[in-house]
Amino acid sequence: MDALARTEKALQAAVTRAEANGCPPRLAAAVRHAVFPRGARIRPRLCLAVANACGEDNPALAEAAGASLELLHCASLVHDDLPCFDDASVRRGKPSVHKAFGEPLAVLAGDAMIVMAFQTLAREFVAAPDRLAPVMLIVSRAVGMPTGIVAGQAWECEPDCVLEDYHRQKTGALFVAATLAGAAATGADLAPWQRLGDLIGASYQVADDIRDLVADAEELGKPVGQDALLGRPSAVAQLGLAGAIQRLEQLVREAVESIPDCPGAGELRALVLSEAKRLRPKKLAAQVAA
Amino acid sequence: MDALARTEKALQAAVTRAEANGCPPRLAAAVRHAVFPRGARIRPRLCLAVANACGEDNPALAEAAGASLELLHCASLVHDDLPCFDDASVRRGKPSVHKAFGEPLAVLAGDAMIVMAFQTLAREFVAAPDRLAPVMLIVSRAVGMPTGIVAGQAWECEPDCVLEDYHRQKTGALFVAATLAGAAATGADLAPWQRLGDLIGASYQVADDIRDLVADAEELGKPVGQDALLGRPSAVAQLGLAGAIQRLEQLVREAVESIPDCPGAGELRALVLSEAKRLRPKKLAAQVAA
C-alpha cells in the first residue's frame, strides 16, 4: 500500500470509530465533511516517508502519527474558515464546514478533531508506550502554545507581528512535526530531520502566498486574493512576486539537499520535488515553460 | 499540600509554560483569563481524591491528569460561551473570554487549552509510560466523539435528543473521566470507580439545572434562567422543581454509597457531600433550614 492509501485507511478508521453509536449525526457528518474527500495529505505523506527512511518496525505507528497531524491540520482549516476569521465559504472546492453545517457545529467539529488526533495516537502507541510521550510532545508543540499553529493564527489578533514568526508557527510548525514525528514513531534520532521540516514548512507558506495572488479560485479550491483583501502578512507583500518565487526555489533546493543519506532518501527527495511542482500555480508554470 | 493547592500548582505550571517566549501576548492573556482565578476545580479534586484512595506512588501523575481535565473543562466553557452558542457575556463573575478578548481569541484559546491538556499528560507521564495511553483514552473518550462533552454540546444542534444522553455526554462524561483517570494514574483497577463518576456527573447536571432556575446571578457568576430562555433540555423542565430536587438528593446518596471501602474512602465521601451542599442554591438551603 502506498503512503496515500495508508493515510486514508488510518483516517477512515479514526473517523469511523468517532461516528459510533451515540454520536450526534450532524456532528459526525461535519467531521466527515472536514476530513474527506482528501486534500494533498502532504503532512502525513511526509511523516510516512521519514519513518520509512528511518526504518520502520511497526508501520501502524507512523500511520497514526500522520493521521493525527492531518486531523489537526483539518481542524485548523475548519476554525480558520469561521466567520470571525476568514469567513471563507469554500474549502477544497466545496462549502466550508460552517457554510454547510452552521457555525456551532464548525466550532465543535474542530474541537472534536483535535481530541481525535491525540486519541488516535493513544490507540496505536499502546504497542510502543515509550514512544507515545515523545510523539505527543512533538505534535502538541506544533499545534498549541507558545509557538504552534494556534499561536500562529493568534498573531492575526495582535497589533504587530514578525512575518517569519507568523509563518513558522502557522504553517511551518506542522511540517517540522511531520518529519520529527515520522522519526520518533520509529524510535530514531530526531536531529537529522528538524531542518528538512523547517525548510518544507517555509517553502509551503511562500508557495501559498504566491498562489493566493496568482492562481485562480478553481485551481486553489478557495477564493484568491484573500491576503491582500484582509491585509494579512504575506511573502508576496514583503518581497514582491518575483522575489517570492526566487525565495521558494531556494527553499526547495535547500530542503532536498538537507535530506541525509539513508535507504529512503531518493523517495523523500522525489516527494519534496513533486510537491514543489504541484504547488506552482498553472499560470506561472505555463510562463516558465513558454 | 491539599488537593486544591496541588491543582492550582499544576495548572499554573501548564499555563506558565504555554506563555513562554514566542507566544502571542493576547492569546496568553486569554488563556490565563479562562483558567484563573479558579472555579470549584471539582473535577481535579475528585481525580486526586480517587488517586489517593487507590494509593499513589507518584502524586505528579494524578495532578497532571486533574489539570488536564480542568483545562478541557475550561476550554468547553470558553467555546460554549461563544456568540454562536450561549452568547454569554459573564462567566465566573467576570467577562467571558470572547467579551474580554474578542471571538477569534476565544476560539483559539479554547483550541490551545485542548492541546495543552494532552501536552500536560505527555510531560508528566514520561515517568510512567505504560499509564499514558490508558489515561489519554479515558480523557479523550470523555471529551470527544462519539459521546464526550463535545458530542454532548452538539446535541443542541440536533432536532431531537434524549435528555439523559445529552446530560451524560455534556456533563457526566468528564466526572466519569475524573474518577477513572485518578485510578488509572496510579495503575489501579478502574472497575470500582465508574459508577461513582456516573452518579456525581448526573447529580451535578441536575444541580446545575436547579441553580439555573432558583439561584441568583451573583451567586451563580453568570446569568440565570438561560435553559428556559434558550429552550434547552433540563431536569427542571422534565421533572418540575420539586422532582428535580428529589432526584438530586437520591443521586448524592447513591454516589456516597458507591464508594468502595478503602483508605481514602472517608475523605472522598466528605468531598461528595460538601460538593452537594455547595451546589444547593442559598435560597433553597434557607427554605430547608426554615
Image (cartoon, coloured by chain):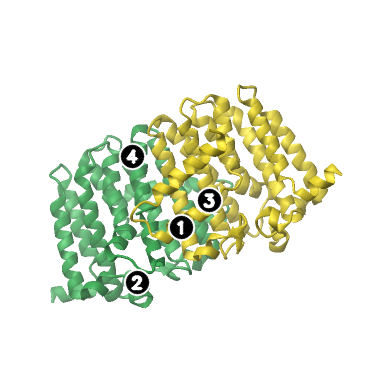
Chain colours: A green, B yellow
The location of residue B196, given as percent across then percent down, is: 64, 33
Mark 1 burial class by Cα count in 10 Å: few <14, some 14-19, many 20+: some
Local packing at callout 4 (Cα closer than 10 Å; few below 14, some 14-19, many 20+) is: some
Q: Secondary structure at mark 1?
A: helix
Residue A134's disc number: 4
Q: CA distance from mark 2 to mark 4?
A: 34 Å
- Say what amino acid the circle numbered 3 marks: Phe
Q: Which mark is drawn over residue B36?
A: 3
Q: Which residue is mark 1?
A: B29
Residue closer to the observer: A235 or A48: A235
Circle 2: residue type: Arg
Q: Where does label 2 land, which residue? A: A232
N-terminal of the two: label 2 or label 4? 4
Identified by mark 1, the residue type is Ala
Q: Nearer the viewer, mark 1 or mark 2?
A: 1
Q: Where residue A157 is drawn, which disc sits there?
A: none
Q: B282 or B185, which lies in front?
A: B282
